[in-house]
Amino acid sequence: MLICALLVIGVAACQQAEEKTTPTPNQDSIQAASTLFAQPSQETPPTPTATPVRELELELNRVIAQMEQAVLAGDYDGYMVYIWDGDPTYLTEQARWAADWQAHPLRAFDLRLNDIRLEAPNTAIARMTMTWSQAGLTSDGSAGGTTVSVVFYREDDQWLLGGENWQIIETGGINLYYFSDEILNNRSQAETVAEYLPAVHTRITREFDFVPDKTAQIKLYENEATLQTLTRLSIPWLTSWNEPGEAIKLTLGPFDSAPDDALVAREYTRFVLHEIGGGTHGNFPWWLEEGIAEYGGATFHTLSQRNRIIKQVAALAVAPEGTEQQILDWQAMQTRPTLPEEDLQQVAIYPAYTLVHYVTETYGSEARNAWIHAIATGHTLEEACPLHLGLSFDNLDAGWREWLPTQL
């Protein structure tokens, strides 16, 4: 009986074991294990395309070598073929820069590139060092150089110099260009200037009753050496530059300070005059353009600052003959005198400013603006005075000279 009982229990256990279902394999686990323990493929993976830095360096250095040779040979066309024409302002600036070294040949000219890198398939960035010296001259300002960040563009399998690698702040009517990279960062100065650019644009366009269709460009350079090297090699000690068709160019002030609102307003006024004249200097005598520009800048001066200039000029007007500084006769200033800027300010620019002030106070801003617009668009000074002020220029001049002593 005991044996029978054990047999019954054994048979039951076997039946239960047979009734258990076989578990379904987990396909995700199988795939993971297969991937984890798979043998590495014997195929060689494709080699990634390397950035052709060496080829880029060779191509760009060939370009600047050709540019160097063209400059030293005085070959304007040979130089301009390597200049990008996608920016009309930059193209104009380069054409005039090249015309300057054609007229004033160089003894030495050297271009060097470093830190070359490809930013996009057809755009490259580099640091460019330019050094130069004029032929036959050894005076201060006859040699110099600078290093700036520049951009190259590739068109039709040819790399072209596209100018300085600027950062831009747009403020409406005026765009501000400045340098900001790992070596030179003028971002803080640019932000200071950008804060008052809308006020400059609004005040000057209202003052002279003209809003240009063209957006002004202001380019901010760190020093005089850079401005001269990239603007006109033959003109030393430039602190500002403003010609029709070119950007307004300014330098930082002492201790790398940003240019103030009065200075920017002065140069923006000059830009407005150029635009009234259809992108030209119009028919202004050089001293009158300076006086109007100074008047625009002075709208950002305090009343005491404006009065101080008027009193300085009034003192010159009553100075005895033979005094070292006197107001220059307008007829004697058909050509801009070769004088230090400070002296020129005292004897010509400030007097012209007070003449514009006198016209405004005596005849009103509407008549003054009509007078300015007439000269900008082709009338002579002598023609514009009777047309819009009701008297000859000689009589205007006499009235101004009589008015000056009353301002002391």
Image (spheres, grey):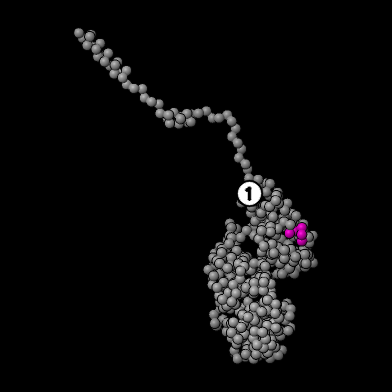
Which of 87 and 123 lies nearest the eye of the viewer?
87
**Element at label 1:** loop
Does residue 142 appear to the left or right of 7 in the view shown?
A: right
Residue 383, compared with residue 184, is above or below; it is: below
Q: From which residue to which does the magenta span run? A: 76-80
- Number of marks: 1
Q: Residue 229, image x and y in percent?
A: 69, 64
Residue 337 position by quadrant: bottom right
Look at label 1 and name its amino acid.
Pro
Residue 15: name its quadrant.
top left
Q: Confirm whether residue 379 shows in the render.
A: yes
Instruction: Determine whether 53 is above or below 349 in the image.
Output: above
Is most of the magenta stretch helix, strand or loop? helix
State the residue at coordinates (70%, 51%): 156
Residue furthest to the front in view is 387
Looking at the figure, which quarter contains the N terminus? top left
Residue drawn 71% across and 61% down? 131
Residue at 78 percent of width and 67 percent of height: 103
Residue position for label 1: 121
Q: Residues within 10 Å of mark 1 (few under 14, many from 20)?
A: few
Quarter of the figure that contains the C terminus: bottom right
Q: Examine the rendered structure and indicate whether residue 257 appears above or below residue 7.
A: below
Q: Does the magenta stretch include residue 201?
A: no
Is 79 covered by the magenta stretch? yes
| Residue 66 percent coordinates (x, y) | 75, 55
Looking at the picture, how far across and down is residue 376, in whole percent? 67, 76
- Percent from the top left, x then y, of residue 387? 66, 84
